[in-house]
């Protein structure tokens, strides 16, 4: 059977990572948006907030981010038996599905919840989340930047601190490492200047080489810095895709695959016929696809 290996009668699954959503926190269409970017969308155009599903060699699932689209995302993922949930940070689109694991819905028990100390503090101070700890829905596993945490014998995650609006908690990207390949999940950060300086490198390529990743899913929230009408994007800082492309240039032979994710509903990259999307492809980079799977 494809994707399976047999060892002394035990079935081992080739570890995988599935991209369960590519949209920014509000999803696509975004609630309340009546502009053409949302009003004219059909069911086939719906995009869920970003989330990753990891399946380890034993077939157990490990979910990065808990979004309000959890039900649809679990169905897309194939409902593997879940062992852990990991959170990058506290912004609402990444955590507003946490309550769905409670007694009223999934009635989960003993899930490992990987979070930073600042995120743990927020959870313990938020009554509905604290109650889930008391009820045994989650068991907190504290993470620290640069330290590897084993999800299974063959799969580990490495949190990577990155500067991002810290009103509620700090922010960690994740490197997912398998037996053959590694993948970076970087849905949010404020600016490349801050991120690169934080890690002591001068270029995006240097940082990705430092992380030793084969695939990078990176923040593509906005195409340009003037994308939001009637609102300053400084309120929600993200490096525009055009800047990331300027820093990278065309893909080179030894570059990892780079996919842009966490797209705002206004981002023209959603339109595959747009000049923006064509420019991305011409340079050798790609847009993440909801449901796509990578082997580790």
Image (spheres, rainbow, N blue to C red):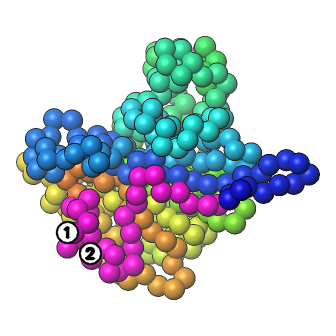
Q: Residue furthest bottom?
A: 253
Q: Position of residue 204 (x, y in %)?
A: 45, 72
What residue is at 21 percent from the left and 69 percent from the top?
273
Is residue 174 depicted above or below 27 in this figure?
below
Q: Is residue 225 left or right of residue 44?
A: left
Q: Report the number of numbered marks.
A: 2
Q: Position of residue 170 (x, y in %)?
A: 46, 42
Helix, strand or loop status at disc 1 = loop
Task: Choose top left, top right, bottom left or bottom right for residue 30.
Answer: top left
Q: Position of residue 224 (x, y in %)?
A: 21, 64
Q: CA distance from mark 1 to mark 2?
A: 6 Å
Q: Residue furthest front?
A: 1
Tag 2 residue: 278
Q: Residue furthest right?
A: 8
What residue is at 22 percent from the left and 45 percent from the top?
42
Q: Could you tell me if the residues under marks 1 and 2 are in contact, i.e. CB atoms within 8 Å? A: yes
Is residue 289 depicted above or below 166 in this figure?
below
* Residue range highlighted in magenta: 268-296
What residue is at 50 percent from the left and 34 percent from the top?
119
Tag 1 residue: 274
């Amino acid at each position: 059977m494809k994707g399976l290996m047999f060892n002394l009668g035990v079935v081992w699954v080739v570890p995988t990572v599935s991209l369960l959503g590519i949209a920014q926190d509000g999803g696509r269409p975004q609630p309340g948006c009546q502009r053409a970017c949302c009003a004219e969308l059909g069911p086939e155009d719906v995009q869920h907030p970003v989330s990753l599903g990891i399946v380890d060699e034993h077939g157990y699932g490990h979910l990065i981010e808990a979004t309000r689209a959890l039900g649809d995302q679990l169905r897309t993922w194939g409902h593997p038996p879940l062992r852990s949930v990991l959170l990058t940070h506290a912004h609402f689109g990444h955590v507003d599905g946490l309550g769905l694991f409670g007694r009223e819905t999934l009635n989960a028990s003993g899930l490992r919840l990987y979070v930073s100390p600042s995120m743990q503090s927020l959870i313990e101070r938020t009554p509905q989340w604290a109650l889930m700890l008391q009820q045994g829905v989650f068991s907190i596993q504290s993470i620290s930047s640069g330290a590897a945490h084993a999800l299974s014998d063959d799969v580990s995650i490495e949190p990577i601190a990155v500067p991002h609006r810290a009103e509620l908690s700090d922010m960690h990207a994740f490197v997912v490492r398998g037996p053959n390949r590694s993948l970076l999940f970087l849905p949010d950060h404020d600016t490349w200047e801050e991120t690169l300086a934080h890690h002591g490198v001068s270029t995006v390529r240097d940082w990705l080489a430092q992380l030793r990743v084969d695939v990078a899913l990176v923040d593509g929230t906005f195409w340009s810095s003037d994308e939001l009408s009637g609102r300053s994007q400084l309120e929600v800082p993200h490096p525009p895709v055009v800047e990331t492309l300027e820093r990278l240039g065309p893909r080179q032979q030894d570059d990892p695959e780079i996919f842009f994710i966490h797209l705002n509903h206004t981002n023209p990259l959603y339109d595959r016929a747009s000049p923006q999307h064509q420019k991305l492809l011409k340079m050798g980079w790609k847009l993440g696809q909801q449901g796509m799977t990578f082997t580790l």
